[in-house]
Amino acid sequence: MFAITPNILSKFLNTLSKYVFLLSILLLSVSIFLIIFLENDYYQGISFKIMFIHVPTAWLSLAIFLVMGVSSIIGLIFKSPTAFTVARSLSPIGLIMSIIVLVTGSIWGNLTWGAYWVWDARLTSMLILAFIYLGHILLLYSFEHFQKADFAASILAIIGLVNLPIVKFSVDWWTTLHQGSSVLKIGGPSMTNDYLITLLVSFFGILMLSIFWFSNIFYIITEKRKIERYRLLND
Amino acid sequence: MRIIKLNNQIKKRFIFLLIILFCFSTSIFLISYSLKDQIAYFVEPSDLKNMNDIENKYLRVGGLVKANSLKFTDGNWIFEVIDQNKNSVNVIFSKTLPNLVEEDKGIIVEGKFIDNIFIAEIVLAKHDENYMPQSAVDKLKKEGKWRGD
């Protein structure tokens, strides 16, 4: 039966990564240009422009966790090394994304709300997500062998999946200081088209950059796995 | 196309994972459901009517700043926080307000009720999820479709 081994996926990603990197540079420079020349918000002024980093990284930190959780499930059920390697190489990217979300969010919060941090549902659940990413990485590197580490870490990733709907819908379920969703909500986006286009361009730019980064990490981990297997076979 | 037959091992692992996910999501749901009053960041003025012993209790009240109610007298900011049901709370605040506090815009006040007046210690501005440039606002106002302010 045909199976995608880590090697095949790594080679495929390698051929792709050059174009992905070029595309991300292109999209990011377009988005920087758009952000600079965009008109300010009527209420928040210039400070709302941090949204074009905050929102794409927030989407990505959720999406990366979803991919990580699903590939952990596939890995655990089918004992697939490829799925485990995908989950393993995604967590550092997700951690960086969630840290960027928290930092840009607290800068934005200080400018608009008047506080860097409050313990409302959205902020707290996002912090928990960042800690789950951190725990996933720590768990991965606290075992001697890949197999045990992958098993333990994927259980954590699957449990962490429960947190995703809480982060996403916290602003609808409870009263929060954080504003509701602007784009992915019932009734269409609540921003003008020029803002929406800028947001999407910057989202795809950051997405491409993280795919490029993912392909690099994936390559390194695949090679490490090969070394470990070689060592185990020759012991 | 080949039909993938699930063997017993795979089925067992699948059920194991389903049970883990079910247990955790149920427990998280039960925890967050029973703590929903604590998780909510603020209460609205209408909710205060159903609460007992609000005097001298540390609370957060959120809503909109009532139009034409924001005043600065004797070194204190005085304003009313109103919600959709037109219930309102009189607030007094002695420090500097955040930049974005305006009439008809969202606000959250943190403090205590003393003699039916809310003595705020912290005031936070709450902005909504609508973003638009000034030119779009002007256009909407010209067409008479503007609902804010």
Image (cartoon, rainbow, N blue to C red):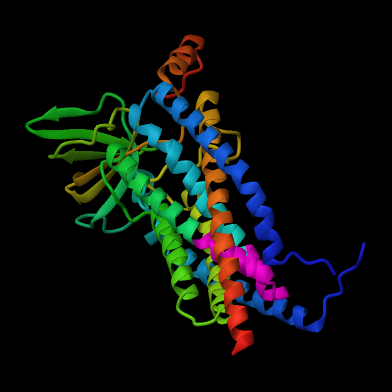
Q: Main secondary structure of the magenta part?
A: helix
Is residue A55 highlighted in magenta?
no
Expressed as whole percent of the image width and height from the top left, the position of residue B138 reads 43, 13
The reply to whether residue B13 is visible in this rendering is yes
Q: Residue furthest right?
A: B1
Q: Is residue A179 above or below residue A156?
A: above
**What segment carries the magenta color?**
A70-91
* Residue at the image position 58 percent from the left and 61 percent from the top: A218
Which residue occupies the foreground of this view, B49 or A140? A140
* Residue at the image position 48 percent from the left and 48 percent from the top: A58
In which quadrant of the rendered view does residue A184 lie? Answer: top right
Which residue occupies the foreground of this view, A3 or A151? A3
Expressed as whole percent of the image width and height from the top left, the position of residue B107 reads 31, 39
The reply to whether residue B116 is visible in this rendering is no
Q: How many marks?
A: 0
Screen quadrant of the C terminus of chain A = bottom right
In which quadrant of the rendered view does residue A70 lie? Answer: bottom right
* Residue at the image position 62 percent from the left and 41 percent from the top: A19
Q: Is residue B59 above or below residue A153?
A: above
Which residue occupies the foreground of this view, A93 or A7? A7
Screen quadrant of the N terminus of chain A = bottom right
